[in-house]
Image: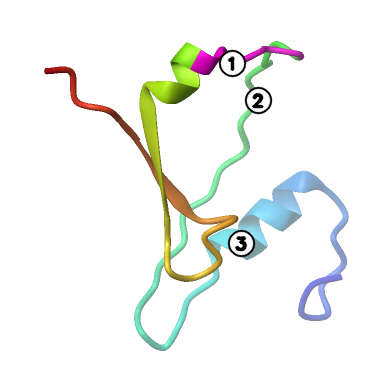
């Protein structure tokens, strides 16, 4: 359960996440993604070298910004 509310299904979880706020004014938006994604996709070294991963100050292992490297 979450805050005393049983987590019966995915929609319940998404609704609880969507109603999360902070005293600082953070508003959270969430939705269920019903897309089907291919499993086992391999990222080549060249593809990985073409991006910049910038970790955020708070839990950089989870929170980061992904950017493409600028092509000269």
Q: Earlier in the sequence, mark 2 or mark 3?
A: 3
Q: Nearer the viewer, mark 2 or mark 1?
A: 1
Quickly name the residue at label 1. 43
**Residue 42 appears left or right of 22:** right
Q: Main secondary structure of the magenta part?
A: loop
Q: Based on the displayed image, in which of its 4 quarters is residue 27 positioned? A: bottom left
Asked if disc 2 and disc 1 are in contact, CB closer than 8 Å, the reply is no
Q: Which residue is mark 3?
A: 17
Q: In the rendered structure, which disc, 2 or 1, sits on the residue that comes first in sequence?
A: 2
Label 2 to label 1, Cα distance in Å? 23 Å
- Direction left: furthest residue: 72
- The residues bearing labels 1 and 3 have C-alpha atoms spaced at a distance of 31 Å
Residue located 55% across and 66% down the image: 59
Label 2 SS:
loop
Residue range in magenta is: 40-45
Query: 10 Å neighbourhood of mark 2: few (<14), some, or many (≥20)?
Result: few
Image position, residue 37 (x, y; %): 67, 16
Q: Report the Cα–Cα distance between label 2 and label 3.
A: 17 Å
Residue drawn at point x = 70 percent, y = 11 percent: 38
Closer to the N terminus: mark 1 or mark 3? 3
Q: List the residue tagged with mark 2.
A: 34
Label pair 2/3, CB-CB below 8 angstroms: no
Within the magenta stretch, is there residue 41?
yes
* Crowd class of label 3 (few under 14; some 14 to 19; many from 20; radius 10 Å): some
Vertically, is 38 above or below 65? above
For mark 1, give the secondary structure: loop
Tell me if residue 34 comes above or below residue 6 in the rendering. Answer: above
């Amino acid at each position: 359960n979450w805050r005393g509310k049983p987590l019966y299904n995915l929609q319940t979880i998404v609704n609880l996440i969507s109603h999360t706020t902070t005293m600082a004014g953070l508003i959270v938006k969430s939705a269920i993604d019903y897309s089907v994604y291919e499993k086992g996709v391999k990222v080549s070294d060249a593809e990985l070298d073409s991006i910049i991963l910038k970790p955020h100050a708070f839990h950089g292992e989870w929170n980061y910004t992904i950017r493409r490297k600028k092509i000269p």
